[in-house]
Amino acid sequence: MPSIFHKLNAAKKLQPIIMLSHMRANTSLFGHIIGNNPEINGYYEMHIGYYSWKSLIRQKLKFLEKHYFKKESKYIFDKVLHDEHEVNCEMLLTHKAKIIISLRSPEETIPSIIKLYQEKVDSSHEFATFNGAAKYYKNRLNTLYEYSEILKNEFIYLDANDIKEKTEETLNYLQQELSLNTPLSTEYNIQNMTGIGESGDHSDNLKLGKISHAKTDFSDIQINKEKMKELEYDYNQIRNKIIEFQKNRK
C-alpha cells in the first residue's frame, strides 16, 4: 500500500517518456544516459503496461518505491520491451507522452538474447534457443510496427546502435526533441537498480558509467542462417515503414 508521502509525490506533474523497443537493443544504456539528466526521472524498465491514465500514476508510484523525483525534473522515463505489457498508444498521446521507438537488427539482437539467457538468466528458457529468441523478436517487430501505425508521425525513431555509433548527433537530437535545458552526457552515474534483478542489462559494460564500444563475441552461438535471412528481411521492411511514418513529424 503506497504511503501518504508516495501519494503526494505521485501528484507531481511529469510528462512521460516511453521507449518502445525490444530486448538487447541498447535500451539499458539509453535509459542510464537519459535518466542521468536532471530534468528526467527513471532509467530502467518498470515491467508495467500503459493501458489507461491509471498506468501513469502507477509508473510514478513504482519509481517512488526506490527513488525520489529530482527537484527540477519535468519527465519520467520507462521502457516497454515485451508484448505481455499492454500499451495504449492513443492514451499516451492524449497525455502528451514523448514516445521513442527503437530497433536493432536481428543479426546483433538474436545472438545477444540467446547468450543472455544461456549464461545469466535461465538456460532452460525458450529464449536461450535460436527458435525461441527468433519468435520473440519477430513478434515484437510486428507489435512495434503496429504501434508506429497508430502513432503515425507522433513519435521519435532511433536505430538502437545510434547511441554508440552516432553518439553526439543522437544526444543533440534528443536534447532538441525533449526541449532539455541541460545537454545529455555520454557519462552517467551508476544507480541503485543498475544491473539488479529484472531492471535490465547485467553486463560489466553498463557499470562503466560511460558508453563502451567493446564488441561481444557470439561465435559460440548457433544460428539458423536461413531463418536469419528471413528475419533480416522482415526487420528492413518494418524499419523502413516506421521511418516513413516518422518522416512527417512536425
Image (spheres, rainbow, N blue to C red):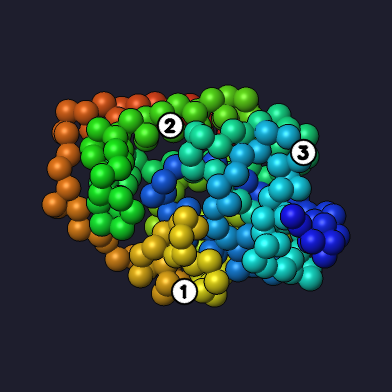
User: Would you name the residue on which mark 1 appears?
Assistant: 209
Residue visible at 34% across and 41% down in the picture = 105
Residue visible at 66% across and 38% down in the picture = 50
Q: Front-most of 188 and 112?
A: 112
- The crowding category of the residue bearing disc 2, from other C-alpha atoms within 10 Å (few below 14, some 14 to 19, many at least 20), is many
Disc 2 to disc 1, how far (Cα)? Answer: 30 Å
Residue 116 shows which numbered tag? none
Please say if the residues under marks 3 and 1 sit with CB atoms less than 8 Å apart.
no
Sequence-wise first label, 2 or 1: 2
- The crowding category of the residue bearing disc 3, from other C-alpha atoms within 10 Å (few below 14, some 14 to 19, many at least 20), is few
- Position above or below: 81 against 35: above
User: Would you name the residue on which mark 3 appears?
Assistant: 53
Q: Front-most of 249 and 109?
A: 109
Please say if the residues under marks 2 and 1 sit with CB atoms less than 8 Å apart.
no
Question: Which quadrant: the C terminus?
Answer: top right
Mark 1 is on which residue type? Answer: Gly
Residue visible at 68% across and 62% down in the picture = 65
- Position above or below: 194 against 250: below
Using residue 6 as the reference point, say whether residue 202 is left or right of it: left
- Position above or below: 24 against 243: below
Q: Position of residue 68 (x, y in %)?
A: 72, 68
Mark 2 is on which residue type? Answer: Leu
- Position above or below: 225 against 167: above
Using residue 147 as the reference point, say whether residue 2 is left or right of it: right
The residue mark sitting in front, 2 or 3, is: 3
Sequence-wise first label, 3 or 1: 3
Report if residue 96 is visible in the image. yes
Using the rendered view, name the quadrant where residue 184 is placed.
bottom right
Q: Position of residue 120 (x, y in %)?
A: 31, 58
